[in-house]
Amino acid sequence: MNTISLNYLVDSLKLIKPEIALSITLVLIVLVDLIMNKDKKFLPYVFVAGLLVTVYLLIEQFSTSAFAFTTAPNLGMVIIDPFGNFFKLLIAFATIIVIMFSVLSNEIKEGLDRQGEYYALMSGMILGMFLMASSADLILIYVSLELVSLSSYVLAGFNKNHVRNSEASLKYVIYGGISSGIMLFGISILYGLTGSTNLYEINSLIQASQVHGLTFIVASVLIFVGMGFKISAAPFHFWTPDVYEGSPIPITAYLSIASKAAGFALLIRFIKITFIQSVDPNGFWHLLNVIDWKTFFIIISILTMTLGNFAALWQNNMKRLLAYSSIAHAGYLLLGLTVLSNEGIMAIIIYFVVYGIMNLGAFLVVMLIANKLGSEEIDDYDGLGSKAPFLSVSLAIFLVSLTGLPPTAGFIGKLYIFMALVDAKMIAVAVIALLNTVVSLYYYIRVLKHIFLNDPQKETQVLSTSVASVVFLVVLITPVLLFGIYFTPLVDLAKSSISLMGF
């Protein structure tokens, strides 16, 4: 019996090699920080090296579909499948880019003596996000979500000398603590009703009609609150503008991509594993008749995109504008889930790739401008087109892509979302999403008006851009333009990510 248990453990550990690589990277960062106490310049390279090993291990097991730490046949706490591996790869690449952000950021350089803690917290955060993308047990879901949250609370207030950083961290802790408490309450109710925390077992109990009624609905919605907080879905978005504005720009960019990706992976898994009844030949999901998730998600997605877009109209700070833009994009992404089909999930995967690239690019330009001007206010961007032409054109490309205009990758992302809605005969929802896109055009174009049409309010010198920054921007701009014309690799990636979904 002990030999069998040991074999199960070894097999499970083999399946989580990327997570083990991340754990080793975390330990190495701490050791390097302790040994080379005065010289912090090697820390980002150690982190990137560990992430590259992690990426290699993820690619190696990309097509694997299996359970780790099984309690019974086909009942595991962790699912290893192409769907989860896609989101892990997205999170890993986003982390590598944000590390490069951090090397270039004046805000992070101010805390040079605490960079060991900075990269250690970030590595703990990515480990939590990896577990979120693969969890099939409510306890592991909560633990992984808290690992991400606790790390991000500290990172949001990394610059202790800036009042707004401390304010952002405090608000994040308060909102995050409340949402986590609500989610844990929902988990405790669900456990009390079912006697299990495994999502597959809960699904079996629902199908056997042992669990139903108002209490179950309330518990499920309470659990959604914790996930809705992570993806910045309205009405759980209140933390986003203040935290995005107050945090260092690299952390703001990281929260807008990686944290959101992990939250969506977790939400999709939770809905499909717990409530799935069958999948028809056309790929549409038939959920158990317990909660009308379709209507629920339609309401949440429309509320999220509408609130995000209209609130962004009044913003005068670029980070707050991009924060509300991020909320609106969460609404668009939720549209892919409202379809309740494999086609909708494929649209979400395509959207996430292009959203990640263009949003990271926009935040990078904002950071480089803030490094020179010391400001993130849109009014201070007046006349920037003549003072920093390369940065201005780069920001214009990213903002046009965020709007969803051709021939950029943003257009392809929204195109597949709309196609999924039309296939599901959700024409009215597609029209509302299209009208929201028109609204978003106004506030993105307003930024470009300040840059290219307004006269500068004060005389400033031409802003130089380092070679490293130029190369970095070109690397991000290229896929934004390329995927707008040739997007077959994106579609193939999305199809392969859902072809062997292990749930």
Image (tube, rainbow, N blue to C red):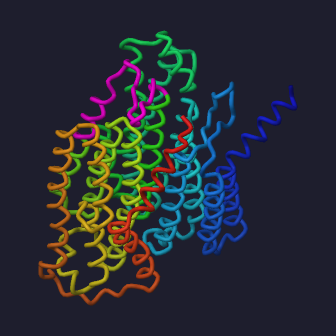
Q: Which residues are magenta?
A: 274-303
Q: In this picture, is 464 found above or below 94?
A: below
Closer to us: 302 or 389: 302
Residue 258 versus residue 423 in the image, above or below = below
Q: How many marks?
A: 0
Q: Is residue 299 magenta?
A: yes
Indicate yes or no whether the magenta region holds residue 298. yes
Q: Residue at x 23, y 49 (%)?
A: 308
Q: In the rendering, at what x and y percent does residue 309 appear? A: 20, 51
Furthest toward the left, the residue is 454
* Quadrant including the C terminus: top right
Q: Residue furthest front?
A: 281
Residue under the image location 41 percent in, 17 percent down: 216
Residue at 64 percent of width and 31 percent of height: 76
In this rendering, would 61 be left or right of 148?
Answer: right
| Quadrant of the rendered image containing residue 10 | top right
Where is residue 277 shown, x and y percent of the image? 45, 23
| Front-most of residues 143 and 107 | 143
Taking the view exactly as shown, the residue that stands out farthest to the bottom is 461
Q: Quadrant of the N terminus?
A: top right
Vertical comparison of 110 with 28: above or below: below
Viewer-nearest residue: 183 or 10:
10
| Horizontal and vertical percent position of residue 438 | 15, 56
Counting from the top left corner in percent of width and height, residue 411 is at 28, 60
Residue at image location 44% in from the left, 49% down from the top? 261
Toward the viewer: 153 or 329? Answer: 329
153 sits left or right of 363 in the view: right
